[in-house]
């Protein structure tokens, strides 16, 4: 007792240890609460893993035939399976780095715009959509016809800035005086001089392929010093005279007509109007020939076959990055918001440019967060499955196959080879384990 009648507690080492019964009770209580989790892990994780590893050493029909490592040899010798492995290597090499980079750029930029919340919502929204719905959406967007597929429609808008399509898709000369074809261009063999009229009649043009705005063709009057003419659809319902402009026949607008001299050099060009009439203007005396350029028949851009065997893997990767860019942006933005601002301001005060601040200050400070995103994406792309099976059509699935899809198709897609399927599953497990261990090591280091 002290002078103030206050009891002094004994030192810590002098305190009595807990009773044996109390410690045993706590152990039993903890075991009781953990037991359901252990049972679930045993039933759904440990047992299937062990069973799959054992099953991978047996043949097609269960445990009747032990085949050793033959299934693993099949994994590396079958073309469809080796293609799946190569595709997964492409996924691992491209997707984690690109998604992390996109997320970093988005996270940094959204700090500088007032509408950052709306932008983050729009970018993160694909995460709320199932991969199946994403596959269906992008499969429609990847349709090759630019009139139906949004991706190729955008591509056509860009391509046609450089290369305009022709006003006609195909045509045939209506008379023997016009030679050539749609692929090489057509030439009126009649010699022309200033004051001549050059009539170029075409057939083989369907009604729905006549250029919009076409009106009744006109037989132009000769003009002194000029070479004029008409390009028209030389077809009259009920019959007509080939090579003669008649009532009911339409002019062909937008046709590029070339005037060539005796050396076959183009000296002038002209475009036809709605009535098919063109005028080269005043020409110097000499002998010329008129003809339709091959560019008149240039076909519109048909679009890329995104869902074909050559482009299916890049198409899948683009759709996958569209889904996960929002995840990377949100995680990196969270790390960016907790970054000490005084360090950034100090760098700017010392004269560093924004690029130097980003490269030498922001990125190093965000390294732990970037590693989280990068490792998560490696694990995800190693087991990608649902997007591939929904987006890739049946004709391209062999070219687009990845390890997880190959495992499913081998085991449950009609082949029913559970031995090889188990070997593929074990191989995928072996690929994922080092990344998981790296993740665990990083967690322990941070703790």
Image: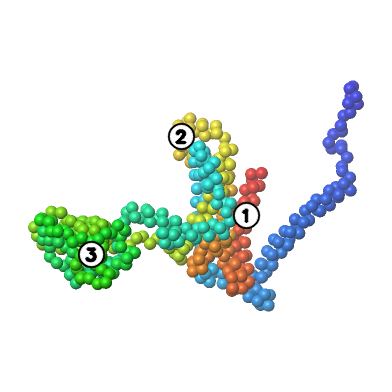
Between residues 102 and 4, which one lies in front from this camera angle? 102
Residue that mark 1 sits on = 436
Q: Which residue is drawn at the image coordinates 51% and 58% (left, top)?
A: 137
Query: Which percent across, then down, holds residue 238?
Result: 27, 72
The colour scheme of the drawn protein is rainbow
Q: Which quarter of the picture shows residue 183?
A: bottom left
Disc with the residue nearer the chain's start (1 vs 3): 3
Q: Is residue 67 above or below residue 396?
A: below
Disc with the residue nearer the chain's start (3 vs 2): 3
User: Extreme top residue here?
Assistant: 3
Label 1 CA crowd tier, 10 Å (few <14, some 14–19, many 20+): some
Disc with the residue nearer the chain's start (1 vs 2): 2
Label 2 CA crowd tier, 10 Å (few <14, some 14–19, many 20+): some
Helix, strand or loop at mark 1? helix
Front position among marks 3 and 2: 3
Helix, strand or loop at mark 3? loop
| Residue 205, numbered label | none
Query: Which percent across, then down, holds residue 437?
Result: 63, 54
Q: Which residue is drawn at the image coordinates 54% and 53% (left, top)?
A: 323
Q: Which quarter of the picture shows residue 272?
A: bottom left
Residue that mark 2 sits on = 352
Q: Distance from label 3 to label 2 (Cα)?
A: 77 Å
Helix, strand or loop at mark 2? loop
Between residues 299 and 22, which one lies in front from this camera angle? 299
Q: Distance from label 1 to label 2 (Cα)?
A: 38 Å
Q: Where's the C terminus, which quadrant?
A: top right
Q: Which quarter of the picture shows residue 249?
A: bottom left
Residue that mark 3 sits on = 247
Q: Which residue is drawn at the image coordinates 32% and 54% (left, top)?
A: 162
Q: Where's the N terminus, which quadrant?
A: top right
Q: Is residue 173 above or below residue 22?
A: below
């Amino acid at each position: 007792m002290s002078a103030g009648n206050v009891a002094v507690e004994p030192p810590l080492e002098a305190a009595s240890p807990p009773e044996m019964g109390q410690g045993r009770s706590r152990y039993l209580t903890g075991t009781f609460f953990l037991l359901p989790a252990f049972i679930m892990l045993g039933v759904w994780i440990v047992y299937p893993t062990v069973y799959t590893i054992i099953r991978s050493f047996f043949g097609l029909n269960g445990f009747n035939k032990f085949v050793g490592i033959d299934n693993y040899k099949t994994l590396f010798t079958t073309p469809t399976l080796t293609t799946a492995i190569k595709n997964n290597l492409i996924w691992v090499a491209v997707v984690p780095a690109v998604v992390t980079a996109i997320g970093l750029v988005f996270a940094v930029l959204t700090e500088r715009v007032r509408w950052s919340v709306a932008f983050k919502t729009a970018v993160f929204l694909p995460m709320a959509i199932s991969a199946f719905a994403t596959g269906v959406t992008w499969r429609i967007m990847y349709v090759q016809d630019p009139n139906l597929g949004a991706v190729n429609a955008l591509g056509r808008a860009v391509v046609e800035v450089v290369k305009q399509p022709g006003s006609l898709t195909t045509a045939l000369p209506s008379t023997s005086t016009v030679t050539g074809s749609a692929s090489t261009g057509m030439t009126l063999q009649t010699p022309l001089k200033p004051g001549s009229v050059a009539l170029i009649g075409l057939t083989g043009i369907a009604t729905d392929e006549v250029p919009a705005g076409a009106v009744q063709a006109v037989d132009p009057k000769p003009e002194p010093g000029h070479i004029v003419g008409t390009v028209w659809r030389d077809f009259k319902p009920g019959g007509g005279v080939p090579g003669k402009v008649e009532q009911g026949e339409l002019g062909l607008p937008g046709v590029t007509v070339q005037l060539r001299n005796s050396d076959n050099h183009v000296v002038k060009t002209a475009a036809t109007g709605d009535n098919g009439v063109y005028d080269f203007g005043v020409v110097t005396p000499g002998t010329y020939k008129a003809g339709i350029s091959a560019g008149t028949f240039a076909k519109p851009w048909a679009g890329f076959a995104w869902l074909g065997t050559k482009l299916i893997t890049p198409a899948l990767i683009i759709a996958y990055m569209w889904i996960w860019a929002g995840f990377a942006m949100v995680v990196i933005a969270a790390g960016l918001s907790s970054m000490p601002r005084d360090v950034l301001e100090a760098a700017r005060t010392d004269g560093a440019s924004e690029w130097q601040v980003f490269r030498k200050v922001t990125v190093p400070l965000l390294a732990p967060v970037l590693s989280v995103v990068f490792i998560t994406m490696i694990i995800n792309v190693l087991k990608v499955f649902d997007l591939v099976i929904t987006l890739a059509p049946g004709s391209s699935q062999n070219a687009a196959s990845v390890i997880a899809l190959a495992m499913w198709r081998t085991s449950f897609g009609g082949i029913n080879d559970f031995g090889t399927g188990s070997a593929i599953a074990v191989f995928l497990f072996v690929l994922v384990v080092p990344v998981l261990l790296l993740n665990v090591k990083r967690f322990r280091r941070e703790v």
